[in-house]
Image (tube, rainbow, N blue to C red):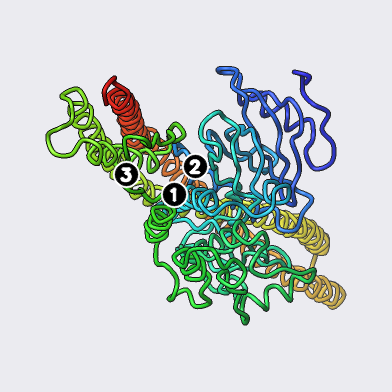
Amino acid sequence: MATGAPHLTGPIRINVAGELLSLGYALLGKLGEGASSGVFDARRLEDGRRVAVKVSRTDIPEPALVVARMQTEWNVGRGLRHPHLVGVYDGGVLSDGRAFLVMERLHGHDLLDELESKGALLPVRALQIARQTCEALQVLHRRGAVHRDVKPENVFLCADGRLPDHVKLIDLGILALPDDDPERAHETTGQFIMGTPLYLAPEQATGARPDARTDLYALGGVLYHMLAGRPPFEGDDPTEIVSRHLNAKADSLGGLLPDLPESIVKLVHHCLEKDREDRPATAQEVITAIDLCIERLAVVIGPPPSLRSAPLPELPLPGAASDWLRYSELVQRYVEAYFPGESAPPALRVSVFEVGDARQSYLKAQATADANRERADLAARDRILQRELHQRRAHHVSAALERARLRVKEASRVADENATALDAVDDAYDNELALLRALTGGEVGDANLRALAARHQSLEVVVLQRTERTAGLDAARALELAAAEQLAALRGEDLDVQRALSEGDLDEQDDGYRNEQAAARAVDHAISALRLVEQSCVRLLFEYVRFLTLPGR
């Protein structure tokens, strides 16, 4: 791929590439274009890292609304480091008014591609994908945001060498905040309801304000799709699909999949309740339910092994924490079954102890990581809302400034017109006085009396005109002064709001950065603790096999 500026056409032009280059990002080529923005492959000049840059379009209805939404996406995602949310590194507004976001460059494919190519997924795989998605939603919800468009296309399966299904929730472009303006909270651009009809919560269809349970409804729809191979409602008419979300019940998963455990069926249909009050209240509630479902799907431990048949349980995939925790318990139970009481050799007993100790250390480290993550999210919530308020105030002040500039310009034009007209009247006044002066200097008589009367009458007309013009000029000057004073006040307000935004940036760089670093460090510790669980399980498995295969056993 070429390293120079790509050929940009349509709504994204070459000047944008130049401005982004000045900000430290070299566009390499276009990755795609959506209804409201274009996405580009880019290189960050600072360190050479490949990133994705999203730039809003201007040839769409209500481009300012798209800019506001991308700013919200930047506010919510800035500085956030989470394994299941696409990273947002930078953002802002370009000189031509378009918004831009610099994001993590992902490799892989989305869940919709997976479903279209492979059909329904195995229940345990579907649950693991849903759990990771729910972890991402939990972070957004704690930060005061609602995704509003959870769908397979926005569940990205990363090909990054980690778990086979490492999920990243993407496209936060229609995020809503609970304290959002009414026009931004639900139905917005044109005639389109915000959200995808196939997974649309009933409250989105009616224009009610969304909340966390709105996302959980959509997640239930995605989980239904993964298990059944199709969405809860489908068809060619979006209006009909929306109507069914409002009025019809989805076909029972238990009827479609008789062998599916009842706990999974209940979980999915619980999320798909029409009334949000009947759904799970939080993402954590869904995560807990998913964990219970996965636990019930785990391999049931069989009878104690015999001398002729000792089981050798398969190792889990690296990084699959819940699988390793179950595995550690499984191997320990096998050891206890084969070596009851104190009959286990000392080395084997040491390995059993190490596994238990590693498991407890991991659980403690994970609890710390969860607490730090929650602390960072809740602290970010206030900063996000404050920045949203400051940005909206900045937007209103900017618009008011523009109107004030136009008012000053118009008031000055009217004042100039009145001043020019008054100058013309003054010329007429001077002329009348000159004519009157020519009639004076002689003796009083009937002839000059009549001439004086005529000139005096003309002068009175001019004086009246001058009085009117003077009043008009005074009024115009007053309006001009008022407009200038308003403009000055708005400039002061603009400085205040820009100062508030700058201070918010400093808070983000200080408190926000520290919180995210603490959360990331705690996650690193939890990962290291999980590695110890994995290693201790492998050692225990080795000792278990070694003693079972000793001569004479």
Instruction: Say if mark 1 contacts mark 3, CB within 8 Å.
Output: no
Residue 62, by quadrant, is: bottom right
* Mark sitting on residue 370: 3
Q: Residues within 10 Å of mark 2 (few under 14, many from 20)?
A: many
Residue occupying the point 33% across, 26% down: 545
Q: CA distance from mark 2 to mark 3?
A: 14 Å
Quadrant including the N terminus: top right
How packed is label 1: few (under 14 Cα within 10 Å), some, or many (20 or more)?
A: many
- The answer to whether 163 appears left or right of 139 in the picture is right
Find disc 2 in the rendering and name its residue.
84
Whether 468 is drawn above or below 518: the answer is below
Residue 453 placement (x, y as % from top left): 80, 76
Circles 2 and 3 in contact, beta carbons < 8 Å: no
Q: Residue at x 73, y 33 (%)?
A: 16
Element class at badge 2: loop
Residue 357 x %, y %: 20, 33
Q: Nearer the viewer, residue 233 or 322?
A: 322
Q: CA distance from mark 1 to mark 2?
A: 7 Å
Q: Position of residue 329 (x, y in %)?
A: 29, 41
- Of mark 1 and mark 2, the one earlier in the sequence is 2
**Residue projecting furthest to the left:** 342
Q: What element does badge 1 sit on?
A: helix
Q: Which residue is mark 1?
A: 135
Q: Is residue 273 above or below residue 401?
A: below
Res 434 → quadrant: bottom right
Q: Is residue 514 visible?
A: no
Q: Amino acid at mark 1?
A: Glu
The amino acid pointed to by label 2 is His
Residue in view at x 79 percent, y 26 percent: 6
Pointer 2 or 3: first along the chain: 2
